[in-house]
């Protein structure tokens, strides 16, 4: 690992070694809907983000990797409950965030797992989280969406339809991967930019949510594949 991701990894390792006691600390905790996987998550991701930006002296991308996402949790649950989906296969976790789905694939017996994310801190977070769960995950930075090749038998993407711009680039990548023979699975809690007419629902799960804007403690989250 080099450059920004290597710097982010040193930072996360320092934070994990000396977590402090405030809302801005990282804690290694079981994932609510996937307790088999433990993740280094921020006690409060917004407070963490503010401290990291203040220390860096410039804006940083939102620390999506420091929280669990409903779509990723449903997808990870689906992989662990159906280990034949990943066992013995080459898996790509696209927009991996914390690496939850990649780690679930590895625990399910995947032959090789690659986790990709454009955020150097996410690359670092997947590294420390894979280590904490004692699994091998190869982590790559950089943006595969427009020109990249999945080079995988199974492509998984949790909670990736959260913006119009992301959805417009993500769907063609996933469709291309499926056309090239990969199995493609998406986890999504019904986000506004989910292209529901292009996807088929395979399963849905009642995932605990901590989002303040939602008036139920459970959210129905779907696992889908390109139609
Ligand atoms: C909402 S989070 C979901 C994380 C994870 N998949 C999960 O379900 O827990 C979205 C992630 O997409 C990543 N991302 C955004 N654009 C990307 C791109 N073009 N290629 C790869 N990752 C991207 C962000 O950095 C972030 O980690």
Image: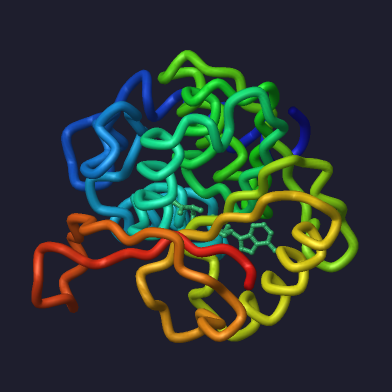
Q: Which residue is drawn at 44% across and 24% down?
A: 14
Indicate the position of residue 50 as horizontal and vertical percent values: 37, 59
Describe residue 16's horizontal placement relative to residue 134 as left or right.
Answer: left
- Coordinates of residue 129 in the picture (x, y in percent): 46, 28
The percent position of residue 49, horizontal first and vertical second, equals: 39, 56
Asked whether 23 or 218 is in front, the reply is 218
Quick check: which quadrant has ligand 1?
A: bottom right
Look at the image and tell me whether residue 51 can be seen: no
Residue at 68% across, 54% down: 118
* 3 versus 146 height, above or below: above
Closest to the observer: 57 or 182? Answer: 182
Is residue 220 visible from the viewing direction of this image? yes
Residue positioned 51% across, 36% down in the render: 125
Report the number of numbered marks: 0
Residue that lies at the very extreme toward the right in this rendered image = 147
Percent across and percent down for residue 215 are 9, 77
Residue 205 in the figure: left or right of residue 69: left
Residue 212 located left or right of residue 193: left
Q: Nearer the viewer, residue 29 or 101?
A: 101
Q: Quadrant of residue 90?
A: top right
The correct choice, above or below, for 103 with respect to 24 in the image is above
């Amino acid at each position: 690992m080099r450059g920004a991701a290597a710097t982010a990894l040193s930072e996360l390792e320092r934070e994990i070694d000396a977590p402090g006691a405030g809302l801005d600390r990282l804690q290694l905790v079981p994932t609510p809907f996937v307790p088999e996987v433990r993740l280094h998550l921020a006690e409060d991701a917004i407070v963490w983000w503010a401290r990291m930006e203040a220390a860096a002296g410039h804006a940083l991308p939102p620390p999506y990797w420091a929280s669990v996402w409903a779509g990723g949790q449903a997808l990870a649950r689906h992989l662990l409950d159906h280990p034949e989906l990943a066992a013995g296969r080459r898996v790509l976790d696209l927009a991996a965030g914390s690496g939850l789905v990649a780690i679930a694939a590895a625990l399910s017996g995947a032959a090789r797992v690659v986790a990709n994310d454009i955020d150097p801190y996410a690359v670092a977070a997947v590294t420390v989280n894979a280590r904490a769960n004692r699994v091998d995950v190869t982590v790559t930075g950089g943006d595969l969406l427009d020109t990249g090749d999945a080079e995988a038998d199974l492509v998984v993407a949790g909670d990736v339809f959260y913006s119009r711009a992301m959805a417009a680039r993500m769907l063609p990548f996933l469709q291309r991967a499926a056309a090239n023979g990969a199995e493609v699975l998406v986890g999504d809690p019904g986000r506004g930019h989910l292209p529901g007419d292009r996807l088929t629902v395979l399963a849905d799960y009642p995932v605990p949510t901590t989002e303040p804007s939602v008036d139920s403690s459970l959210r129905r989250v779907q696992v889908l594949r390109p139609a």
